[in-house]
Amino acid sequence: MTQDTDRFDELIATIQNKLYTAVVSDVLDRHGYLDQAMDAGIRPIERGMRVVGRAHTVLATDIYERQANPYVKEIASIDAVTPGSCVVASTHRSTRTCFWGELLSTATRARGGAGCIIDGYTRDSDAIIEMGFPVFSTGFKPVDSAPRSMVVDYGCPIECGGVRVNPGDVVFGDFDGIVVIPIDVLPDVVAEAVKKVESENLTRDMLRQGYLLREVYDKYGVL
Amino acid sequence: MTQDTDRFDELIATIQNKLYTAVVSDVLDRHGYLDQAMDAGIRPIERGMRVVGRAHTVLATDIYERQANPYVKEIASIDAVTPGSCVVASTHRSTRTCFWGELLSTATRARGGAGCIIDGYTRDSDAIIEMGFPVFSTGFKPVDSAPRSMVVDYGCPIECGGVRVNPGDVVFGDFDGIVVIPIDVLPDVVAEAVKKVESENLTRDMLRQGYLLREVYDKYGVL
Amino acid sequence: MTQDTDRFDELIATIQNKLYTAVVSDVLDRHGYLDQAMDAGIRPIERGMRVVGRAHTVLATDIYERQANPYVKEIASIDAVTPGSCVVASTHRSTRTCFWGELLSTATRARGGAGCIIDGYTRDSDAIIEMGFPVFSTGFKPVDSAPRSMVVDYGCPIECGGVRVNPGDVVFGDFDGIVVIPIDVLPDVVAEAVKKVESENLTRDMLRQGYLLREVYDKYGVL
Amino acid sequence: MTQDTDRFDELIATIQNKLYTAVVSDVLDRHGYLDQAMDAGIRPIERGMRVVGRAHTVLATDIYERQANPYVKEIASIDAVTPGSCVVASTHRSTRTCFWGELLSTATRARGGAGCIIDGYTRDSDAIIEMGFPVFSTGFKPVDSAPRSMVVDYGCPIECGGVRVNPGDVVFGDFDGIVVIPIDVLPDVVAEAVKKVESENLTRDMLRQGYLLREVYDKYGVL
Amino acid sequence: MTQDTDRFDELIATIQNKLYTAVVSDVLDRHGYLDQAMDAGIRPIERGMRVVGRAHTVLATDIYERQANPYVKEIASIDAVTPGSCVVASTHRSTRTCFWGELLSTATRARGGAGCIIDGYTRDSDAIIEMGFPVFSTGFKPVDSAPRSMVVDYGCPIECGGVRVNPGDVVFGDFDGIVVIPIDVLPDVVAEAVKKVESENLTRDMLRQGYLLREVYDKYGVL
Amino acid sequence: MTQDTDRFDELIATIQNKLYTAVVSDVLDRHGYLDQAMDAGIRPIERGMRVVGRAHTVLATDIYERQANPYVKEIASIDAVTPGSCVVASTHRSTRTCFWGELLSTATRARGGAGCIIDGYTRDSDAIIEMGFPVFSTGFKPVDSAPRSMVVDYGCPIECGGVRVNPGDVVFGDFDGIVVIPIDVLPDVVAEAVKKVESENLTRDMLRQGYLLREVYDKYGVL
């Protein structure tokens, strides 16, 4: 099991250091996974932010009255974060609440969490950026979640940005967007993506030298 | 009256120097004002822009023919700007016109205006950013307003970003968004927000030290 | 013909060096062209990007099955780019595919193309920004076009961002947006825009000195 | 208390037999309630359907995995319907699930419920129309709720169609839409609305006789 | 002038009795008018409603405070309706107000107006349908316009449903939608449309007899 | 093969005569097909319309210039309709063109086609309704397709209303919406759906007799 963990950490490190979402998406296409890229509306809150980790899923819903214990499940969901995971939260694209903020970022990092991807808003963005904690959101709103939404469940399958995310899937985000890598194909996808990065260098070089796309494609069979 | 003005200026300075929109929104929640944050689509045109001031409201509407005197009310509305106010303009979320630009920014600043918040587009964004004049808008379009929209009224109640804004309300914007503070609760809201900033430091410290959210919440009763 | 080309290149250089989209849009208004600014959703992928060039139009459509030769027309459309042109691509605002990326940017630049304007997504944004190749898009998605869309035609009239673009029209983009200049009025528009830039300096100076908008407008008759 | 109930039933009967939503909305305006009409997207599933009753609120959320006991709260929420009430359900405008259908209509009617208003879809529409059971929805989708959404709470404050609905408020729907009447002003609103219906008859008669709107307005001071 | 009026009335009668919007749109296409059909969101409030008349344009805007004399321009705009005209009102697609209703329908008919086309809501729909007065709207809302919108101008160029409408253009609506016929081409368009109706009968007959579309198109050169 | 065809026709007849989309969707859920119901925006153009048939897919795209031979692929796509099929057309939700109309309906029926489902507009709706030819569309627009769109392919996989449709899948539409039945599970789905219709009768009867949903669910284990 230690070996498995080490192997997993190595894969994550390879993604973090050598890959980008576009090449991972291309390899997922070849494996028949065509719907793994989240909606373009979920963006890193700062240029340069990248995140990769096992999905720690959270499901929230809008409410219209402050609950007696508003934060019970929300607190539990964040305290359950484990090292190397990334919070992936569905608010059903709520434009009413703001689920994420600096305190949840601080708590997540303290548990070893790698970042947060949410189909809703964040706040405390200046502080989060200063922390260097990667957050991908649909925007910003300065409101508290307590009277506006509550956590319904966590560690369950969700949809985020139009993609089904199962707990344990690997999520990977950079400036081009976010891809969800099903855990079963992770090793193959990483290995093939590393190779594709290399072959793209050849294609790029030919184009820079002035060859036509037609010539490059005829030679390498890929774009 | 001088005392009142001084007191008001002091409150504005406190907001400008010590507060952020999220903490102000939290305090407004406690006072029962739950709908004071504008839609997330209204964004500062540059990171780091902040604005606070009394709302100087303007109401515009799309038109389809250049008027005989296209700028009459528009000119009057900007010439009526007073020191310490912030233009808050409703175009009814128009995607056709562009009400704001460099000249209006220059004229507003010359009258002592603090900035502009608009549920529509701006142009001349490079020049405005160079001026360091804070503008919050729904985006950019390089078109003139004259044949596309006209000012209907100013100094009247409007809605901007889904929030009712009465002339004299205080508007406050930063990277997280914009909150509207009703004038009646301004002193209380500022005082309580200053205190909340301090208490949040304690919570943050505990989390950084590795305490669970559960422990922090049990101790301070807030997140 | 050489003279014509020189004259054209001079006009393009004037736009690139002395003008901005807002002043060009104002002059187009005077000529009765009121619908030449693209939708505000098409944005430069980095602040500071500017592009001007003859429109090299491309028309794509979403598909749901990888074609036998997926890139035939796409390759032809990019290999047909000529120096001084700018790719203007319509995907019908697709949120499914991602037509643009680094390789097409590299190939376009190798043919002398000035940039790309697209009513859809791009990927490889980090690499493109590093190249300094101006791309205006509706956002980012890390997916390949091959199983998601195909080029239907190029060098044909299209609509992009709500504006009709004929091959050969001049497109001009900066941080305020994108304007399409019909080729027939290009010389007049450029000449008048240069003059308008100068007159705006006078207006701006008066406003900075504290004159009212009313006084400035009465003197110069323009805003 | 019996007297109160009788009085309440009488008010409901007056609304049902003599009033329409437009006149009730006008009277609510006069009382300062300007935001009581639901979004125009919630429509009766058949022309001629009218409903009036005390709001029996239900709050649902989308989910992405069939629950162990999918219908527990859903069943409880409908079994709790009381005579003279109208189900008002918020799905947060879900386009994924379909919360309502024939069986819930049958069960609601069996408990004495008057109808259903939902910011989501219904199914079994032919059967429901045949039953003559009034349903107001945002449309139709033939899918089961069990693997797509679950009831979170009922008998709580909700928002439906953009209007806050407290349990016990009176909801009233006809072909023009749906208004929510706060329980406190119900007797006054009904009494004034009955009078306004009469005065509108006079206005209408004058207009039919050919008088100008100007003349009618000068005479009656209302439109 | 009487002759002209007679001729005009004859053309209107021909449209009313013999034509439908699709055939008129086809003929407008041939004349190079490709953008004369309004958005599909503007629908007759009842199946079977048809309207044709000279456009009597009205321009309204949302407001957020009841005006001192809320109905001044609204009253004037309707009292100015002339026989054979059709009200065409732009509310800028407002979802907040409801500009139209039974009293305005009654007043318009009393002045000889043929109907109303509006890019906003109507109310009193049951009464209007009973009157048999054709109204084309984007939906229904039971609210009064007085505290929500006001008429800004009338008899001016507007846009309605995405189409520019000049006062005096002829508007024609049926179940397929609404087309705007520029007054200059009216006689030609009507004449050609009458002929096209006849030729379509031939095409339809061949198809009913089982001929292939290919054969029919080869014979008549039209679909 | 005749046996197969007979068996297939029998299944289609069973769907047409005994089933409705909701019960089919429920059975598809049990088989793990959770995304087979099209978006709620595609509606029958008249109440009571039902359609069932093998999908005859057509893929169209918007264009901005009339083609030399505008109807070549369009004609071919309709002339290829076979008895018992139903045209399923993707226009990528175009709001610009109108692909369907009376002549295509007539030609489709002449070839034995059962109806048309389109994620776009139709025209000639009165004539189509009179024909009793079932059309499911997103609305109506009276414009010709020739200068606005063209057929790209047919008999290929498409997406329509958010559901992947492969040629040969069975599509079934009624007033609740449209479901796509993959051909492999057709016999099982039909058989199970017939049984489910019967069991729902028992549930409905108990509810009518006044039993609680709780009691009914405890007894039958289904809702």
Image: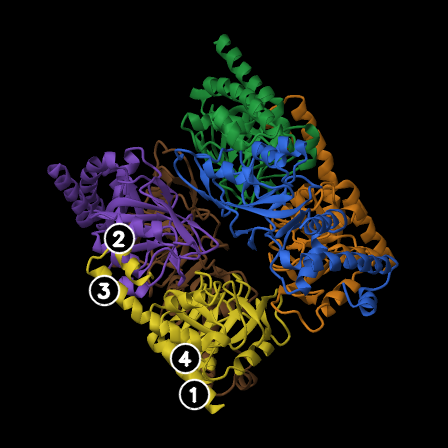
Chain colours: A yellow, B brown, C purple, D orange, E green, F blue
Q: Measure how far apart labels 1 and 3 are at the Cα level.
A: 36 Å
Determine the chain carrying the residue at label 4: A
Q: Measure how far apart labels 4 and 1 are at the Cα level.
A: 10 Å
Q: Is residue C188 left or right of residue B139?
A: left
Q: Which secondary structure, mark 1?
A: helix
- At x 27%, y 59%, the residue is A216
> Mark 1 or mark 3: which comes first in sequence?
1
Q: Name the residue under label 1.
A: A6
Q: Which of A111 and C149 is in front in this view?
A: C149
Rendering coords of residue A199 (x, y %): 30, 69
Q: Measure how far apart labels 2 and 1 are at the Cα level.
A: 45 Å
Q: Name the residue under label 4.
A: A12
* Marks 1, 3 in one chain: yes
Q: Which secondary structure, mark 2?
A: loop
* Marks 4, 2 in one chain: no
Q: Can residue A137 be seen in this view?
A: no
Q: Which amino acid, mark 3? A: Asp
Rendering coords of residue C200 (x, y %): 22, 44
Q: Is C75 located above or below residue D146 in the figure?
A: above
In contact (CB < 8 Å): disc 3 and disc 2 = no
Task: Identify the mark at residue A205; answer none if there is no mark.
Answer: 3
- At x 77%, y 50%, the residue is F18
Q: Based on the displayed image, in which of its 4 quarters is residue D168 positioned? A: bottom right
> Mark 3 or mark 4: which comes first in sequence?
4
> Mark 4 or mark 1: which comes first in sequence?
1
Q: Measure how far apart labels 4 and 2 are at the Cα level.
A: 35 Å
Q: Which amino acid, mark 1? A: Asp
Q: Using a 10 Å C-alpha cutoff, classify the residue at mark 4 as few (fewer than 14 neighbours), some (14 to 19) or many (20 or more).
A: many
